[in-house]
Amino acid sequence: MVHEQHQAIFKAGSRTYYHSSRFFPKEIRDEVFILYGFVRVADNFVDALPQNPEGFYEFCRLYRRAAAGHPADDPIIDSFAALQQRKQFDPQWTEAFLLSMEMDLHTSQYETLDETLKYIYGSAETIGLYMAAVMELPQQARQYAALLGRAMQYINFIRDIDEDNRLRRRYLPLEGTELPDLDERTARRYPEEFCRYIRREIRRYYQWQQQAEIGYSFIPKSCRIPIQTASDMYKWTADTIYRQPLTVFSKKIKPSKPRVISRFLSNFLRG
């Protein structure tokens, strides 16, 4: 089944959000799986070692063909194009998303926060906009949905510093720090400066997260609790790294499935 394929792709790429998304009502859950199947496949082309630019550009071509009303004969692309039409996604969101994925083929470092935020708009804020449209939230909810996507992406950047180093990427800007890079050897040579920098960036995340949570009031309970659960797990990740920033080099900080389920139940009981 198509949904099984989407589910497998989603589960392989985003454990925290996948386990949280399983608590959506079935109709919403299926559409979330379609959305994340599409964005994960696109992301996989540019994150592969070696990268697959030919596959990525063919994926883009087939998406644009499907969006124009000509089936791509690809269940991931065609189901997303149908979802885009059904939920009235702005096609510019998808173009922005694909542009950020293309940036991963050519750009390895971001020197300023503005540069990083330009990338984040396409790679993460658009996901928040898609989700708001899937849940049919009012227009005024969209700014908060985009901000939640930004906050989650920023914690991913912090959590994945070591992995991104191996890919020769740096999404976090080094403005306001004396660190020349985020290499483990540098961090261990200057542990106080590294920890100060990481905690500062996590506080930036906390600020965005707090602002994004204002938007919870627009989300019906059946959808709000899965969103809040995923958000809480990103905060748990942030809190864990904040206490010991150097742990980003020893393991990938991710909540376990039992932790996600426990948080969901707690949020559900609190309403």
Image: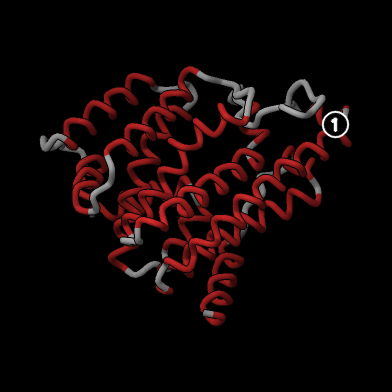
Q: Residue furthest bottom?
A: 269
Residue 154 sits above or below residue 139 on the image:
above
**Residue type marked 1:** Arg
Residue ID at (62%, 31%): 113
In percent of width and height, residue 177 lies at 79, 28
Residue ID at (71%, 27%): 174
Quadrant position of the N terminus in the picture = bottom left
Q: Residue furthest left?
A: 70
Q: Is 128 positioned to the left or the right of 261 in the image? A: left
In percent of width and height, residue 16 lies at 53, 55
In percent of width and height, residue 180 lies at 77, 20
Report which residue position mark 1 lands on: 188
Q: Residues within 10 Å of mark 1 (few under 14, many from 20)?
A: some
In percent of width and height, residue 263 lies at 59, 70
Residue 264 sits above or below residue 178 on the image:
below
Residue ID at (51%, 49%): 147
Disc 1 element:
helix
Q: Quadrant of residue 108?
A: top right
